[in-house]
Amino acid sequence: MRKLLILSIGLGLMACVTSKMIITGNIYSPYGGIVKVYQSPPEDVEYEEIGWVSVEGDLGPQWVDMIQSMQVEAAKKGANAIILSATKQTQEVRPAIGLYAGSSSQKSMIAIAIRIKE
């Protein structure tokens, strides 16, 4: 029962993530392997850009969850790697309306989806 609860919580956090991709190059069959993550463009391999993938989420998801979401989205278009481009976290304070006041946090990331030529 405990494993089911932990799994449900994990899936709930992932559900708070929205990813999308803008295609800028060729699309390939979905990639079934592990999508590599680079912090800067790889210099020792030849690759082509497939598109830009972005992800947004509220306070719940961790950065690693957001990267995994981008990996999945990129793989759907045939990318076998992503290059992290930008991260952003904002804090918004909402004014009091009646008895409710609060704040929310928003995270976003952008990466370039690439296909490394082998």
Image (cartoon, grey):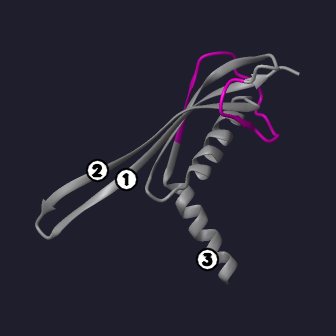
Q: Secondary structure at mark 3?
A: helix
Numbered tag placed on residue 105 in the rendering: 1
Q: Quadrant of residue 33?
A: top right
Report the residue marked by disc 3: 5
Q: Quadrant of the N terminus?
A: bottom right
Q: Is residue 41 left or right of residue 14?
A: right
Please provide percent x and percent y for residue 6.
63, 73
Mark 1 burial class by Cα count in 10 Å: few <14, some 14-19, many 20+: few
Between discs 2 and 3, the one toward the N terminus: 3
Front in this rendered view, residue 45 or 75: 45
Between discs 1 and 3, the one toward the N terminus: 3
Q: Identify the residue at horizontal 24%, vertical 54% (top origin).
A: 93
Q: Quadrant of residue 4?
A: bottom right
Q: Is residue 30 magenta?
A: yes
Report the residue marked by disc 2: 92
Q: Is residue 90 left or right of residue 56?
A: left
Q: Is residue 21 magenta?
A: yes
Please provide percent x and percent y for residue 52.
57, 26
Q: Identify the residue at horizontal 53%, vertical 60% (top origin).
A: 13
Q: Quadrant of the C terminus?
A: top right
Measured Cα–Cα span from mark 2 to mark 3: 30 Å
In front of the other: label 2 or label 3? Answer: 2
Please provide percent x and percent y for residue 11.
59, 62
> What residue range appears in magenta?
19-41
Residue type of the residue flagged with mark 2: Glu
